[in-house]
């Protein structure tokens, strides 16, 4: 029987790991025994997050829309570790507003954060995965990449684009045993995971996305989930 991958000492980079879904993902991988780098724009917030996650977590300041910052972050990680095993492209952000009022600057900020930054970060780390003939690339998408919301055209365009990027990238790297997996959360709570695990009126939680990624990373290398939608089971308030 095939044993799941042991994540002890696995080398993991989580972009946007100082808060929200990325923070829970970093917690989960450290708890599984991995070494984790988290990135974010604010040094103070990032350092506090890494301290809360504990040993095995290294904070590196990096702005997702700045290619030179991504270069510096990747060079530091690869110089320290030689390569990585898992890349979690999580950093992103909404905004932009309704199309009639949207500025070109707002459009570019959303696209650069959610789509171009993923391309550039992946490009920095992919050669090391190809060289070692093994790696996992997770991309945190959104249900907005399948069913857009009003006023979210820039965000939807970026998230739709991520799915196309990931599917094409997969064809480029499958022969190098590199997996590319998109995870699309529905509405997700991102605070402390203190509520009940099931019942009416309970949304999906960021800790659930984190547990999903750890599970996928542990699957045998011959196994690939390309595009996964994750929903809350029963988010409807009692009596609705």
Image (cartoon, grey):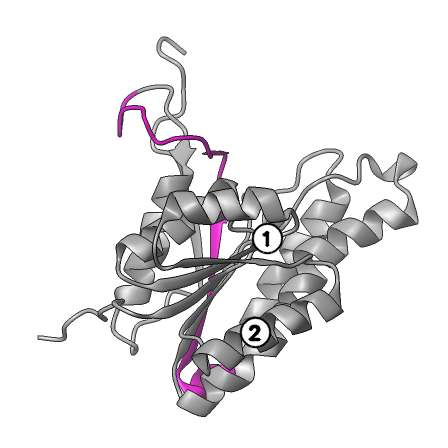
Q: Position of residue 223 (x, y in %)?
A: 30, 72
Q: Quick check: 153 left or right of 215?
A: right
Residue 215 placement (x, y as % from top left):
28, 58
Query: Mark 1–mark 2 contact, CB under 8 Å?
Result: no
**Magenta residues, as a range?**
173-199
Q: Which element is circle 1 on?
A: loop
Q: As drawn, which residue projects farthest toward the top?
A: 239
- Name the residue that disc number 2 marks: 76
Q: Secondary structure at mark 2?
A: helix
Can residue 175 be seen by looking at this rendering?
Answer: no
Instruction: Specify whether residue 174 is painted magenta.
Output: yes
Where 44 falls versus 37 (above or below)?
above
> Residue 128: in sight, yes or no?
yes
For image coordinates 59% across by 43% down, the residue present is: 44
Q: Quadrant of the N terminus?
A: bottom left
- 216 in the magenta segment: no
Camera-side residue: 218 or 53? 53
Label tally? 2
Label whose residue precedes the other's in the sequence (1 or 2) = 2
Q: Can you tell which of label 1 and label 2 is closer to the viewer?
A: 2
What residue did someone put label 1 on?
91
């Amino acid at each position: 029987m095939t044993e799941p991958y042991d994540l002890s000492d696995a080398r993991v980079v989580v972009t946007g790991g100082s808060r929200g879904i990325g923070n829970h993902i970093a917690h989960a991988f450290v708890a599984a025994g991995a070494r984790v780098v988290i990135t974010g724009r604010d040094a103070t917030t990032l350092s506090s997050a890494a301290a809360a996650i504990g040993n095995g977590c290294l904070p590196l300041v990096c702005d997702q829309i700045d290619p030179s910052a991504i270069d510096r972050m990747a060079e530091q990680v690869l110089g320290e570790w030689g390569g990585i095993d898992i890349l979690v492209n999580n950093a992103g952000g909404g905004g932009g507003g309704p199309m009639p009022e949207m500025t070109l600057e707002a459009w570019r900020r959303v696209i650069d954060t959610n789509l171009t930054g993923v391309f550039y970060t992946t490009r920095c780390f992919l050669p090391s995965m190809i060289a070692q003939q093994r790696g996992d690339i997770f991309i945190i998408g959104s249900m907005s990449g399948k069913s857009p919301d009003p006023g979210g055209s820039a965000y939807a365009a970026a998230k739709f684009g991520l799915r196309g990027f990931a599917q094409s990238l997969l064809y480029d790297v499958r022969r190098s045993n590199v997996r590319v997996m998109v995870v699309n959360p529905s509405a997700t709570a991102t605070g402390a995971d203190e509520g009940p695990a099931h019942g009416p009126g309970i949304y999906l939680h960021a800790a659930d996305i984190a547990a999903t990624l750890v599970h996928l990373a542990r699957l045998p290398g011959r196994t690939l989930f390309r595009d996964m939608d994750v929903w809350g089971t029963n988010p409807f308030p009692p009596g609705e």
